Image (spheres, helix red, strand yellow):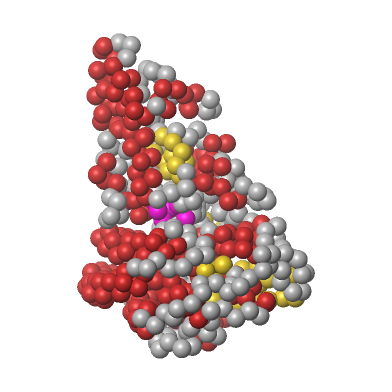
Amino acid sequence: MAEILEVKDIAQQEYLINMGPQHPSTHGVMRLVVSLNGEIVKNVQPHCGYIHRGIEKMCEKLTYPQIIHLTDRMDYLSAHMNNASVCLTVEKALGIEIPERVKYIRTIMDELQRIASHQLWWCAFGMDLGGLTCFFYGLRDREPILDIFEESTGSRLIQSYYTPGGLMNDIHPDFQKKVKEFIKYFRKILPEYDQLLTGNVIFQERTKGIGILSKEEAINRGLTGPSGRGSGFACDVRKRAPYHLYDKVDFKECLYEEGDTFARYKVRIDEMWESMKIIEQLIDNIPEGDYTAKMKAVIKLPEGEFFQRVETARGELICFIVSDGNKNPLRVKFRSPNLINLASLNVMSKDFKIADLVAISGSLDLVIPCMDR
Amino acid sequence: MKYDEFRDNESLELLKKNGTNIFMTTVDGIFNWGRANSIWPLTFATSCCGIEMMATGASRHDFSRFGLEVYRASPRQADVIVVAGTIVNKMAPVLKRLYDQMSDPKYVMAMGACAISGGPFFYNSYHVVKGVEHVIPVDIYIPGCPPRPEALLYGFIQLQRLIKSESLHEKRESMKNYV
């Protein structure tokens, strides 16, 4: 005889729902097993590995300039910063001084990439919450940046532009002109983003007070990048441990104390303004000179352990290389901001509705191939 | 019509004249015209190529011009699956399941080096499927890492040509060996 359940027993039963791996709002192939009590999220269990390609293991067979090309394919929306993490580690280990010109170009490229990444995040986030117009606005304004990349680096999305010691090739003669044109254009356009989405009542109701993470919890869970700064955790590597030219330029670290989805949204919008400010300070002063330092044909790192932190558009990326003196690394480890930011999803979405889970995971801006590597 | 002849892109109009049956070709023509101009792709992206696929659907490249119109989130509503990105061993059964869930007639496009052959992860990687054709039958290959949006558009146009020269009573060559 079937067991007779009382109404209160049924209410206490957990209901498991599978979100992904093919789900349009996970932005990739991530699988979330969500336990629900009615409509309320009780637990989120992420399952990784649907795009695990073994990049770290592959790096052990490759030389240092070859590793660069795999790093773009981790976090393809901040490809330049990923390249920089390996390049800076190798340069640090070898103790070489790179030309000023390279530093200027790298900083500008990084910031352009950050704007492009935040634009894409903005359009995808708007789309997740039902605002399809955002998708077209965001990608329209992203195209000029990709054009600038394409002229100088030869590729739109995955550039592999940095090499240990400098750059793959010099910038295009029109680079400065195009960047200035873009900044002028985007300064006019960015307030439109606010008019379209930030001030929208439906959008605010779906984001304000949703997915709150306290500062203590953010620090405990290592939530970095714009998501961490939305909780008030001052974790910008560009300020804390400056690389490139970030110690010479003037910019603000965007911090919000609320820790909800709207705060994380605001951090990214503010960061786009700050990135434009950084580019404007540098674009007119690019010094003449070589675009690469003199490097040996075969790069061999001295024996030891080396690491470098960089700030990608999603958070703190650490490249950790263990070398035994050969031309291949003994072990390469990437501390991906996405995987570690994902750890907070469970805490953030607890006791919120399942419909808010899309907004919360969208506000973390996860790139799944970087998570799984 | 023979599958081999589809490879010659320029002789499609000529091929269309060489049909077998006047009635069937007329019906085919009407069907194919309708199907070729309303291919709806599935929102399926695993990695970098997905971003270029988004760019293809967005403002500058706008694939609605070619009748591709919208991405569908459910495989049951989609006509074509664009495999945009690397497929790894853990993902392969999911991809096959997605493909099986799509209703006939369905098409597959392998976008980018990873979907074609494993691409940059061909050597030394222990977890990457070396080409999506090992899992599902592929109709169109688009090379590049990642391919430009223009390349994807070109691939879609090739798919439309393929559909236009199809016949209702004949199974596609790529589908014949698929179980």
- Residue at position x 35%, y 61% from top? A147
From the image, which quarter does the N terminus of chain B lie in? top left
Residue situated in front as seen by the camera: A147 or A55: A147
Please say if A237 is above or below B45. below
- In this rendered view, identify the residue nearer to me: A30 or A280: A280
- State the image coordinates of residue A288 (x, y, percent, origin top left): 45, 78
Q: Position of residue A111 (x, y in %)?
A: 42, 74
- Going by the image, does B128 lie left or right of B111? right
Residue at the spot x=44%, y=33% of the render? B139
Image position of A154 with respect to B9: above or below: below
The answer to whether one can see residue A47 in this image is: yes
**Residue at x-position 39% and y-position 61%:** A151
Quarter where residue B131 is shown: top right
| Residue at the image position 37 percent from the left and 29 percent from the top | B9
For the question of whether residue A16 can be seen, the reply is no
In the image, taking residue A72 as reference, residue A285 lies left or right, namely: left
State the image quarter where residue A326 is shown: bottom right
Q: Position of residue A268 (x, y in %)?
A: 38, 75
Stretch in magenta: B48-53
Main SS of the magenta part reads helix
Q: Nearer the viewer, residue A304 or A361?
A: A304
> Magenta span has A283?
no
Above or below for B82 versus A349: above
In which quarter of the view is residue A359 placed? bottom left
Q: Residue B82: image x %, image y %?
A: 42, 43
Q: Left or right: where does residue A28 sit relative to residue A222?
A: left
Image quadrant containing the C terminus of chain B: top right
Q: Is residue B88 left or right of residue A256?
A: right
Q: Relative to A161, does residue A194 appear above or below in the rendering?
A: below
The residue furthest top is B21
